[in-house]
Image (cartoon, helix red, strand yellow):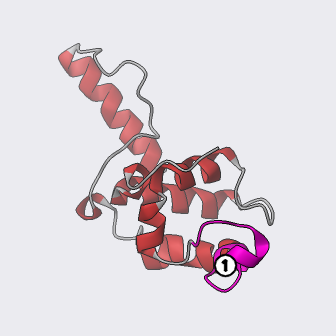
Amino acid sequence: MTFRSLTMAGALLALGACGDDSSEGDDDHSHEGGADECPAELTYAASAAPVLQKYCAACHAPTTASALGAGNIIDTEARIREHGKGLYDLVLSGEMPKSGKLPDAEKTNFLDWMECSGAAAAGHDHSH
């Protein structure tokens, strides 16, 4: 079970226990946690950095972004947070990476880390 699945299960249990449906429209892709809420295996080094290096660096590194018209430099945890919501949505939808499909396991780990670390809700929404 993924972090996002666990988050949704917890939300459903909370709704059932309280009978409060004021969160209508929320889904399991809106968790706003903190770094202390991430499971031990979901770290930037294990879940995000490898994805950046393997799938993002070719277009979004400081040396290539402007030359390739990528626009945004996304090469560090701080830059992930800077583009948080928009980046999360682009990866979730499959629009990024443009270099090819992100394997499901790597996509899940990356998105789970973004959610539990709060990066998914951080920064500005630069999505299209």
Residue beneath the point at 47% across and 70% down: 79
Label 1 Cα crowd, 10 Å radius (few <14 / some 14-19 / many 20+): some
Left or right: 19 as drawn, with respect to 113: left
Q: Is residue 74 left or right of residue 17?
A: right
Q: Residue at x 44, y 58 (%)?
A: 114
Q: Does the magenta portion include 13?
A: no
Give the residue drawn at x 21%, y 20%: 17
Q: Position of residue 61 (x, y in %)?
A: 63, 80
Residue located 56% across and 71% down the image = 74
Q: Position of residue 44 (x, y in %)?
A: 43, 73
48 in relation to 94, above or below: below
Q: Is residue 62 magenta?
A: yes
- Determine which residue is flagged by label 1: 57
**The image quarter in which residue 23 lies:** top left
Residue placed most toward the observer, 71 or 42 = 71
Residue furthest out toward the right = 100
Range covered by the magenta-colored residues: 58-73
Residue nearer the viewer, 125 or 47: 125
> What x and y, as percent, mark residue 78?
41, 72
Tell me how many marks there are: 1
Left-right relation of 65 to 73: right
- Looking at the rendering, in which quadrant would you find the C terminus? top right
Q: Residue 27 is drawn in which quadrant?
A: top left
